[in-house]
Amino acid sequence: MNLESIRMAMRGIVANRMRSALTMLGILIGVGAVIILVAVGAGSAAKSRQSLAALGSNTLTVSAGGFGQGNRGGTQSRNLQINDADVTAINDKTQAPDVTDVVPIVNGGGSVTASLNGSSATVGQFLGTTPNYSSVRNAPVQAGAFLTADDLANHASVAVVGTTVAKNLLGATADPNSIVGTNVQFGNHTITIIGVLKAKGSNGFQDQDDIAILPMSTVRDSYTGNTGTINQLIVQASNANTTGAAQAEISSVLQAHHKGATANSFRVLNQAALLQTANASNRTFTVLLGSVAAISLLVGGIGVMNIMLVTVTERTREIGIRKAIGARTGAILGQFLTEAVLLSLLGGILGIASGYAGSHFQIVGVKPVIQTYSVILAIGVALAVGLFFGIYPASRAAKLRPIDALRYE
């Protein structure tokens, strides 16, 4: 490829503007589709990681009841309940050395309606817990304060709410933080709001901001009764590498404290394992999307070959004249191969621009995240397409005999 070949190739492209534009459009669509669809896959993966991270770092969720139990085992599991003694035992470093913190959660029971100044709304999650919920569950407040040890000890009638609860009571246009300090009726009890949680949005299954958090002692006093049972535990491991060991320790402690309990009697969900599974699924999803998009590049390449064959046919006499006055076979080959590569390259550059433009919009609720490797791969494939699909038309032009080319009408 030399300057003369590039000059003649550009002249051929400009001479047939519409045809060249349509050919480049095929490559543009292919490159743009690869970049955007890979970006959608990456964005989906990032969204999944954020959703899991919002549940807390290095955490395990423990609840009564497991999977794959027989009739007798299932009945036993339903009768087993996590209790306050289990919290103390799992917090014991001699029994569970890889556990750093345990957060008990008591559900408020049924649907609880919140009321304020004539406005009312059902709270999606109404629960009682301890002050360490904020750090373990990664739930900081954006206004006011979170529950304290004194609130728990004094059975205080206070609550921290999510932004959805605040807006449902105050109005969609109101500042959710202004609910701090007000008294809200939750069911038959008046509770003072002391804080508003930082917004998290939806995790794909529920609105994480539709929540009210009270001291566990208060929920037991006013809503569930002080039975000593706990619906769920959020356990934090010392780090991401010890979640597996922490899971085994939790299972061992619970089995030791409950007669007849087995490994299936309690369900322990490992956030690290869920994240690994989600990442593997997202990688497969991204590869699938990229592969589907790559098909359009193949179609674009076929379009390049088709146009180049037409170009060679139209310029047969020109080829004959050039060969008659001494043009070498390599020069003819270079001219048409350069034209094919330039068509693909220009289409690829426009495809990159369209890919970046498309990444500014949400697609099926996902914000695309451009991956540098997809841009490099897409433009590389575009060049390869130009070379591969341009070789046959270019070699066909180069092999024409001058006498046959000059006779062509």
Image (cartoon, helix red, strand yellow):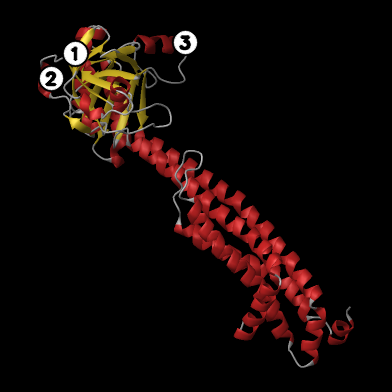
Are the residues tagged 1 and 2 within 8 Å (C-beta)?
yes
- Pointer 1 residue: 218
Residue 122, placed above or below residue 376: above
The image shows residue 1 at horizontal and vertical percentages of 62, 81
Residue 302, quarter of the rendered image: bottom right
The image shows residue 177 at horizontal and vertical percentages of 22, 29
Type of amino acid at the residue the image marks with label 1: Thr
Query: Could you tell me which residue is drawn at 90 percent across and 83 percent down?
Result: 407
Type of amino acid at the residue the image marks with label 3: Asn
Type of amino acid at the residue the image marks with label 2: Asp
Q: Nearer the viewer, mark 2 or mark 3?
A: 2
Position of 195 compared to 383: left or right?
Answer: left
Q: Is residue 134 visible?
A: yes
Q: Between 4 and 387, which is closer to the camera in this rendering?
A: 4
What count of labels does the image hold? 3
The image shows residue 224 at horizontal and vertical percentages of 26, 8
- Pointer 3 residue: 71
Mark 2 element type: helix
Q: Is residue 227 visible?
A: no
Q: Between 258 and 172, which is closer to the camera in this rendering?
A: 172
Residue 350, quarter of the rendered image: bottom right
Q: Nearer the viewer, mark 3 or mark 1?
A: 1
Residue 7, placed above or below residue 271: below
Mark 1 element type: helix
Mark 3 element type: helix
State the separation of the CA atoms marked 1 and 2. Answer: 9 Å
Position of 27 compared to 81: left or right?
Answer: right
Q: Between 379 and 175, which is closer to the camera in this rendering?
A: 175
Quadrant (top left, top right, bottom left, bottom right) of the C terminus? bottom right
* First along the sequence among labels 3 and 1: 3
Query: Could you tell me which residue is drawn at 11 percent across and 17 percent down?
Result: 153
Q: Which mark is residue 151?
A: 2
